[in-house]
Image: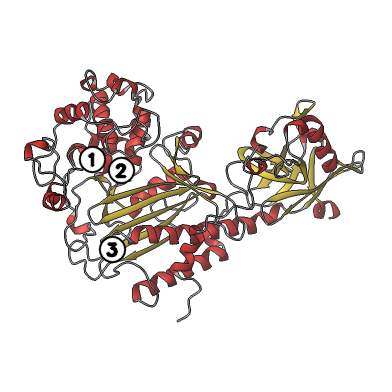
Amino acid sequence: MKLPYSIAKILSLTAQFTSAELKCRPEGPVLPRTTALTKSPIFQTAAANLTETLNAALSGSITSEWPTNNVSFSLAVVSAEQDDPGVPIWEYHHLAAANTKGTKKLDRDSQYLIGSITKVFTDYVLLKSGMNIDAPVTEYLPGLDGKSKIQWRDVTLRMLASYLGGTPANYGFSDFYLLKEVFLAYGLPTIEDDDYPPCGVVGLNKACTRQEILSGMRESYPQTAPNERPAYSNMAFVILGLALEEYTGKTYAQLLEDTVSGPLKMENTFPSPGDDYRAVIPPGDSSWGSDYKLNTPAGGLVSSLSDLSKFSHALLSRTLNMTSTEINGWLKPSAFAGNAYTLTGMPWEILRLPNLTPEHPHTVTVYGKSGGAQNYRSQLSFIDDYGLAIIILTAGPMKAAPILTNAVLSTFVGAADEASREQAKRYEQRYMSDHEDVLIEATLEQDEDSMILTSLRRNGTDIMSSLNDIWGLTLGDFLPEIGPKIRVFPSQLGENATLDGEHVTKEVWHLWPDLASGFETNLPGNEIEDMNCVGWSIQDWVHYGGEPLDRVLLYVGDNGDVGGIEVPFLQSGILYPAKRNRD
């Protein structure tokens, strides 16, 4: 059987970290998000192709790279526009033959351990708690104050929530007592049981109490200085859980129910242990049924595909109990994490991927959070530029999760990008003034990268050429050569309006001049300028009569048709599509 895609081909799209063609643009969507994505033939073809490829991987027709008989999984793509928050626009489930325990009917309501995806909910609870997240943690947990190897007075709640507190990765758990004989065989010195931490060591002692955690944190080494660099830490979220409970007087389970599970009707999201009859339980040993106790805020929740879809939809559609401004702030990086493509946030594991859209290369930002427990691995990723999220839940040998994540990402982000370009053809028109005293016309087209302004004239004067000259005159001393192309990018700014008696959205777009790469110089280091995206620093910089020379307005109807464009700095009024003027 010949398939349109293979797992290897899909993965190659994310493995090739080559330079993006659209090297400098405003951060955010290149074109407006696609509406009615599921009706797009591009999306439908991509979904069918990936489903066929997954079927082939499970049947053995192509290589999967994981033991398909031992790994159950649930996959989903969530859209900001889906009709039912709990029903993704695409999903795929597989119940492995070796999964003899738990549910016999795997669906979107089946329960998985989600591991550290829990941290997303802990941070959300923190943001909604009313606590001052920039206050030192000692303000809420005075038991951390005093003599300590970690200077807790310098560690804020925000740092803990963003991996920047320098806190230990674990306490007790990282001492692999059950492998003691193996360590000795590898030449490590003999130690006594009393040399291990007094709690939290699997196979040796009991779970830690609140006081034992606080005492242990005063005795533990820091990973880094506060705010030095990100260092992954479960203990940071254990401490956040203690601080939340201290401040609110509620348990973490109550806070989760009040803030997340209850409002969003996430009936399958709660602290482990879950419900065996709904559970996806892998063969062999696993963490299913564990009580994570005080470690729950770091990675102890059970959830389902449908529940994670509800949360993802609320965030993407900006209906979560946060303002759009707050969500925009949450989806931001906090630190770099070791290479040009990896950053961290609160608690995001952020990838800046240049080749998710190989037909139209540009950097796409993915705000993700992975999760893991024994024989469970999961991924929740937001691609906000396209109004999409992906959910990967697996039970069994853990190699499958990243392979499936990359396959779903590369398939559906590429499809969403192609669909957005197809839908944006509605903007590609010649627009003209409908009065004769001042003749103004503008033309929008797409090239391989973005929307571009191909013509702008006023009473016969080439305003595009004038803009390049004006930008050169006012800003040329600061910039490389300004190129002939003027790109046009959308923003989140917009308002309701009326056009010819019909409701429309007045969208704010910005003109963005292409800049040459580097300067004409024989001195070394000119390639550095090629990496510098300076365009963001010149937006809104040149005005005429109080109007920015880079601000234009598009009038878009409820059906998606574009009814006009306005160029305020030209006092153009609304320019209508030329076809309408001919009619």
Q: Which amino acid does the dot numbered 3 rest on?
A: Leu
Residue 180 image label? none
Q: Which residue in the structure is indicated by mark 1?
A: 296
Q: Which residue in the structure is indicated by mark 3?
A: 106
Q: Are marks 1 and 3 in contact (CB under 8 Å)?
A: no
The earlier-in-sequence mark between 1 and 2 is 2
Q: Secondary structure at mark 1?
A: helix
Residue 463 quadrant: top right
Front residue of 346/389: it is 346
Q: Which residue in the structure is indicated by mark 2?
A: 118
Judged by depth in the image, the label closer to the viewer, 1 or 3, is: 1
Q: Are marks 1 and 2 in contact (CB under 8 Å)?
A: yes
Q: Is residue 258 left or right of residue 63?
A: left
Alpha carbon separation for disc pair 1 and 2: 8 Å
Q: Are marks 3 and 2 in contact (CB under 8 Å)?
A: no
Q: Secondary structure at mark 2?
A: helix
Point out residue 28 in the picture as x, y percentages from the top left corner: 57, 43
Point out residue 320 in the picture as x, y percentages from the top left corner: 42, 39
Point out residue 181 in the picture as x, y percentages from the top left corner: 11, 52
Alpha carbon separation for disc pair 1 and 3: 25 Å
